[in-house]
Amino acid sequence: MAPRALTAIPVECTRGRETSSHVPLVVREPEAGWWAAQQIGSSVTVAAVREGDTAGHPQMVMSRLAALATAAELLVIFGSNARSAQHALVADLRARLPRRQVVALRVRHRHGDLLRDAATVERLLDAGRLPVVVTPAPALVDVTAEIASYLRADRVLRVLRTLQGADLYQVWQRRPEPSLN
């Protein structure tokens, strides 16, 4: 069975004295699956880690970061003033995630350049890389808030010390947008 054309003969339209022919406009609603596919976005988790937070139990925090990086898109924002600490964090993540490309990106809290830096982070995430944003410790909260807002991150995690060691805990989560059903 061959599909037939919507109209084999154009329909005549008359406006004033002119006559022109056209094909009638057919509007089709997309399937429900198409709408669902359009609304699915990537979920981005932002983990804010201050240099001193991992002092007592760095292995616990690093294993948790590696587990998060394998499960979803992860952005690590590391607040540190020492270059040796940032190199150790990046090297540890590279060792734990040999199949992921871990990219360190130095970001200072400058209002004019932060938007450009956030766009760079977004491109790295889109390419499947694990960005580690390194920022001075006093600017950690501001840089985390601005980049998480730019990326429309789903949640933000922080390292909290407990009696058992240290772990990542959720400090903020984006509310789901209301559906229009």
Image (spheres, rainbow, N blue to C red):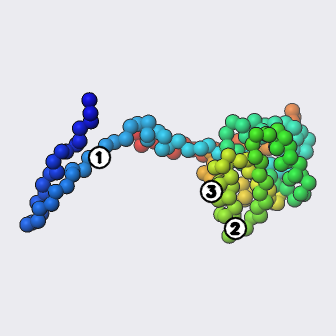
Is 36 placed left or right of 80 in the picture?
A: left
State the SS at label 1: loop
State the SS at label 3: helix
Nearer to the camera, 7 or 128: 7
Q: Position of residue 64 (x, y in %)?
A: 78, 37
Is 73 placed left or right of 140 in the picture?
A: left
Identify residue type, mark 1.
Val
Between discs 1 and 3, the one toward the N terminus: 1
Mark identifier at residue 113: 2
Q: What residue lies at 83% left-to-right and 48% top-to-bottom?
A: 90
Identify residue type, mark 2.
Asp
Q: Look at mark 1 in the image and give the residue it sits on.
A: 27
User: What is the C-alpha distance between the residues marked 1 and 3?
Assistant: 35 Å
Residue at the far left in the pictured view: 17
Q: Position of residue 157 (x, y in %)?
A: 72, 44
Which of pointers 2 and 1 indicates the residue nearer the eye? 1
Q: Look at mark 3 in the image and give the residue it sits on.
A: 150
